[in-house]
Image (tube, rainbow, N blue to C red):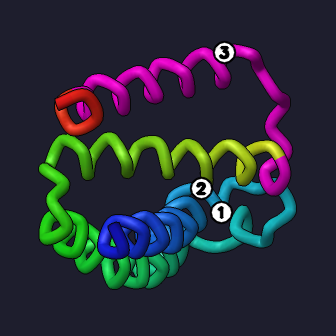
Amino acid sequence: MMKIALTISMLVVSNVFMTWAWYGHLKKGSGADSKPLLMIILMSWGLAFFEYCFMIPANRLGSAGGLNVAQLKIMQEVITLCVFIPFALFYIGEKWKWDYLWAFLCVLGAVFFVNRERLFG
């Protein structure tokens, strides 16, 4: 159980780096608008390096803890949404849409189905 908890924690950290690398430069007034695209790409790659420093060990640890690849992937998607939605709303300034909730619930359905055997034998 400790391996899975550590896996989740590392995936959260990884997703924070990933979200900043992929979307942080889209905030209006962030200064990224005036920078050349190549510079933004290189800066994003720099952040993505740290994403991978957490993602790869997290996946290996989760696998060693008994999670299969599908479970790891679906867990990753849920964590991505848990990190991305607050980022989009509070940092980028996107407006809330109820469709975000419905999409998130669909992903939670995927969590259920990918873990059904583990939960119910």
Relative to the observer, which residue lies in front, 13 or 32? 13
Indicate the quadrant where residue 16 lies: bottom right
Residue 18 left/right relative to 16: left
Looking at the rendered structure, the secondary structure element under dot 2 is: helix
Which residue range is magenta in the image?
90-116
Give residue 84's position: percent from left, percent from top.
61, 49
Q: Residue at x 74, y 16 (%)?
A: 98
Is 68 situated above or below 29? above
Dominant secondary structure, magenta: helix
* Label disc, if present, on residue 25 of the rendered structure: 1
Which of the two labelled residues, at mark 3 and mark 2, occupies the earlier sequence position? Answer: 2
Q: Residue at x 84, y 51 (%)?
A: 90
Relative to the observer, which residue lies in front, 46 or 8? 8
Relative to the observer, which residue lies in front, 56 or 6? 6
Does the magenta segment cover residue 112?
Answer: yes
* Label disc, if present, on residue 23 of the rendered structure: 2
Q: Residue at x 65, y 62 (%)?
A: 24
Relative to the observer, which residue lies in front, 57 or 96? 57
Give residue 12's position: percent from left, percent from top.
51, 65
Looking at the rendered structure, the secondary structure element under dot 1 is: helix
Q: Is residue 37 visible?
A: no
Report the amino acid beneath label 1: His
Residue pushed farthest front? 121
Residue beneath label 3, please? 99
